[in-house]
């Protein structure tokens, strides 16, 4: 029978099917961080359970961590306590721990792929919804709750209903200035934030084939923002080249054996999906959001839609625009920006900093904006230095901070003040996401760069 | 976390007819710094309930003494965004045992089922009927019968049935959770693990 990539990976991980219930689903790799794991360990200990396969779990500190002076003790006592708790739990149960200052430290979804934890055909979970990032490698990867973190720790399994299957095909050539982030935001704007709820998405078409691994990660990362459980892309030579030789990828004969399996990981020609969408690459502009969910995005040259042109309730729409301080039908171009954040597991990889640098090179930071440039990991930070991007940044008046989630969710000190506008390369523009009262405009690193030097929403195509 | 057995719930309800309520609103990230599951109810909808100076936002429904009860009736696409289980904990710790909506985000729904909050998905029309009934009279009660999988507006008698998978239903009725189940089949899991290539 013809099957999809998703079926192949899912079905090979089902330990057993529960009658009238979910599948017992085996997890190959488990990532944990300091925010969603402590209560799971409390639960484990109170039931007197242990960790079944500590070598399959990796602990990374990222959500709470400061992005300057990481060598100093963490000032916020609550954050410090969470970081310490992660470290203690990892050491008590024999789990590898990449804490603050460790050379492998960074955002959990950036360091997983960098170290070969993320492999094609694997199942990967983490108590964080953007675990979908790892689907770029042909893995089934998704976010779980803390109760499920506890399940994985003690049994390496979770109980999951198999999602439905969706395929999103995009073909054609992307226009100048259009990045993977724009592709993701475009898809969400078309499907809305709940359009893929209950589905697992496969991205197909030459747009994704032509993307770098970094770009694929950006797109898969955003899958959750349209409600999908996760998104994945069939592995190809680019995938294999990326992972070959990484610290934790199979080596020698194991690699050859794995390759044989990985080469089978594609959707058969006549396999079917529960839902399928087709879009054209040329319809996608550089995108920006104007509202308080990631589905509220438009091409940067367009005006904010009127309430009757959008799906959903008028009251909710008006609440959202009033939070943003915007009116229907206004243009986005020229809107004042106070903060720029480049980073997160969506756009905190080397390619994103290359993009940012390409626009700001030889120019100067706008005086009215505060800019936080936060690499996704120490590896990214090192590359920024090795490639000389750091000099371009510094010459233009920017400084580079240290890795972590930072202003993506503002659990550390990188908070956008109430009422201020931030262009952010992260993934969520919810009310208060970047600090109480903050107003977030999601966009690509190119759009962020254009705003960082002009102080207003600017079409990056005018600067390329 | 195992929880109390879930029986029939009859209660007044709190209306929150806003769409796309995300988990960042249910519990803002800055309240996720605890290492134990305590006190999350206090910060449920924190920024909608309180001003920056901690004074009450009188208009928000949780601050309106007319509305109370163990059932929260939300707008479409409730619980989208971050996977934080803290959102389900805060709903539970505040005292809700059931959330009703015409559409739930996936992870939030799962998290609710794992912590003893029953997510009840109704048709958009039925959700409207509930809102109308509550706005007519805040003292009316809803009855959630998990065994029969029905939700009833007791004042009007209007009823709808809802879906829940049989396994989760049994768990909730008995106060079991997935960990209990998985522990019991550990031998199978360990055998399966030996077949994984990496
Ligand atoms: S960068 Fe943002 S979205 Fe990514 S893991 Fe960190 S908090 Fe979550």
Image (spheres, coloured by chain):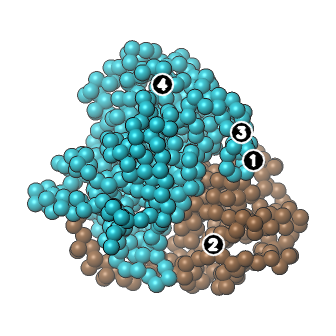
Q: How far apart are marks 1 and 2 (CA)?
A: 29 Å
Left or right: A333 as drawn, with respect to A184: right
Left or right: B184 as drawn, with respect to A304: left
Q: Earlier in the sequence, mark 4 or mark 3?
A: 3
**Residue A38 screen position, x and y as percent:** 45, 60
Q: Residues within 10 Å of mark 2 (few under 14, many from 20)?
A: many
**Foreground label between 3 and 1:** 3
What SS does tag 1 mark? helix
Left or right: A276 as drawn, with respect to A418: left
Q: In which quarter of the image is residue B149?
A: bottom right
Which image quarter is the C terminus of chain B in?
Answer: bottom left
Q: Distance between the residues labelled 2 and 3?
A: 36 Å
Q: Distance between the residues labelled 3 and 1?
A: 10 Å
Q: Earlier in the sequence, mark 3 or mark 1?
A: 3
Q: Which chain is brown?
A: B
Instruction: Report the front residue among A42 and B32.
Output: B32
Q: How far apart are marks 1 and 4 (CA)?
A: 32 Å
In the rendered image of the structure, the colour used to display chain A is cyan
**What chain is tagged by disc 2?**
B
**Residue B147 screen position, x and y as percent:** 65, 85
| Disc number placed over residue A314 in the picture, else none | 1
What SS does tag 4 mark? helix
**Residue A264 screen position, x and y as percent:** 24, 62
- Looking at the image, can residue A136 be seen? yes
Check disc 3 and report the residue beneath it: A306
Check disc 2 and report the residue beneath it: B118
Q: Which of marks 1 and 4 is nearer the N terminus?
A: 1
């Amino acid at each position: 029978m013809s099957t999809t990539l998703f079926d192949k990976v899912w079905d090979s991980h089902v330990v057993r099917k529960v009658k009238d219930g979910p599948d017992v689903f085996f997890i190959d790799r488990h990532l944990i961080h300091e925010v969603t794991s402590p209560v799971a360990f409390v639960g484990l200990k109170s039931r007197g359970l242990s960790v079944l396969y500590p070598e399959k779990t990796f602990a990374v500190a990222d959500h709470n961590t400061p992005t300057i002076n990481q060598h100093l003790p963490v000032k916020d006592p609550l954050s410090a306590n969470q970081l310490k708790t992660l470290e203690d739990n990892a050491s008590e149960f024999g789990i590898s721990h990449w804490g603050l200052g460790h050379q492998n430290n960074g955002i959990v979804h950036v360091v997983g792929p960098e170290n070969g934890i993320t492999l094609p055909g694997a199942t990967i979970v983490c108590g964080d919804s953007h675990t979908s990032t790892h689907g770029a490698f042909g893995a089934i990867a998704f976010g779980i709750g803390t109760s499920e973190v506890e399940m994985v720790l003690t049994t390496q399994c979770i109980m999951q209903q198999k999602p439905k299957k969706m395929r999103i095909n995009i073909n054609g050539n992307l226009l100048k200035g259009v990045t993977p982030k724009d592709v993701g935001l475009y898809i969400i704007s078309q499907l809305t934030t709940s359009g893929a709820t209950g589905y697992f998405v496969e991205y197909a078409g030459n747009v994704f084939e032509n993307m770098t691994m970094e770009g694929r990660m950006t797109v898969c990362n955003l899958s959750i923002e349209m409600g999908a459980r996760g998104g994945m892309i069939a592995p190809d030579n680019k995938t294999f080249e990326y992972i070959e030789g990484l610290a934790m990828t199979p080596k020698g004969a194991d690699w050859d054996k794995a390759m044989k399996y990985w080469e089978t990981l594609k959707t058969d020609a006549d396999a079917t999906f529960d839902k399928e969408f087709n879009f054209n690459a040329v319809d996608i502009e550089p995108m920006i959001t104007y509202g308080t969910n990631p589905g509220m995005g438009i091409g940067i040259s367009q005006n904010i839609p009127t309430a009757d042109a959008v799906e959903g309730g008028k009251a909710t729409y008006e609440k959202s625009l009033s939070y943003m301080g915007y009116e229907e039908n206004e243009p986005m171009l020229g809107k004042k920006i106070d903060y720029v954040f480049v980073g997160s597991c969506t756009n905190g990889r080397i390619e994103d900093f290359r993009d940012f640098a390409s626009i700001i090179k030889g120019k100067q930071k706008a005086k009215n904006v505060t800019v936080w440039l936060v690499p996704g990991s120490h590896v990214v930070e090192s590359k920024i230095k090795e490639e000389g991007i750091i000099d371009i940044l510094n010459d233009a008046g920017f400084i580079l901070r240290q890795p972590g989630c930072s202003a993506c969710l503002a659990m550390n000190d990188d908070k956008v003040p109430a009422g201020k506008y931030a262009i952010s390369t992260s993934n969520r523009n919810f009310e208060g996401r970047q600090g109480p009262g903050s107003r977030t405009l999601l966009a690509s690193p190119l759009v962020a760069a254009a705003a960082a030097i002009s102080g207003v929403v600017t079409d990056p195509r005018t600067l390329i | 976390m195992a929880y109390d057995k879930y029986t029939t719930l009859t209660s007044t309800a709190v209306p929150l007819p806003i769409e796309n309520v995300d988990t960042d609103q249910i519990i803002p990230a800055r309240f996720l710094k605890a290492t134990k599951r305590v006190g999350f109810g206090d910060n449920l909808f924190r920024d909608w309930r309180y001003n920056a100076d901690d004074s009450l936002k009188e208009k928000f429904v949780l601050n309106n003494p007319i509305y109370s009860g163990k059932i929260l009736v939300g707008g479409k696409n409730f619980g989208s965004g971050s996977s934080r289980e803290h959102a389900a904990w805060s709903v539970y710790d505040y005292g809700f045992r059931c959330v009703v909506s015409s559409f739930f985000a996936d992870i939030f729904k799962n998290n609710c089922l794992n912590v003893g909050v029953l997510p009840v998905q109704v048709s958009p029309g039925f959700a409207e009927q509930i809102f109308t009934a509550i706005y007519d009279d805040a003292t009316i009660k809803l009855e959630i019968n998990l065994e029969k999988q029905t939700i009833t507006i007791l004042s009007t008698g209007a009823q709808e049935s809802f879906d829940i998978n049989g396994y989760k239903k049994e768990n909730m009725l008995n106060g079991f959770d997935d960990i209990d189940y998985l522990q019991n089949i550990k031998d199978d899991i360990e055998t399966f693990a030996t077949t994984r290539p990496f």
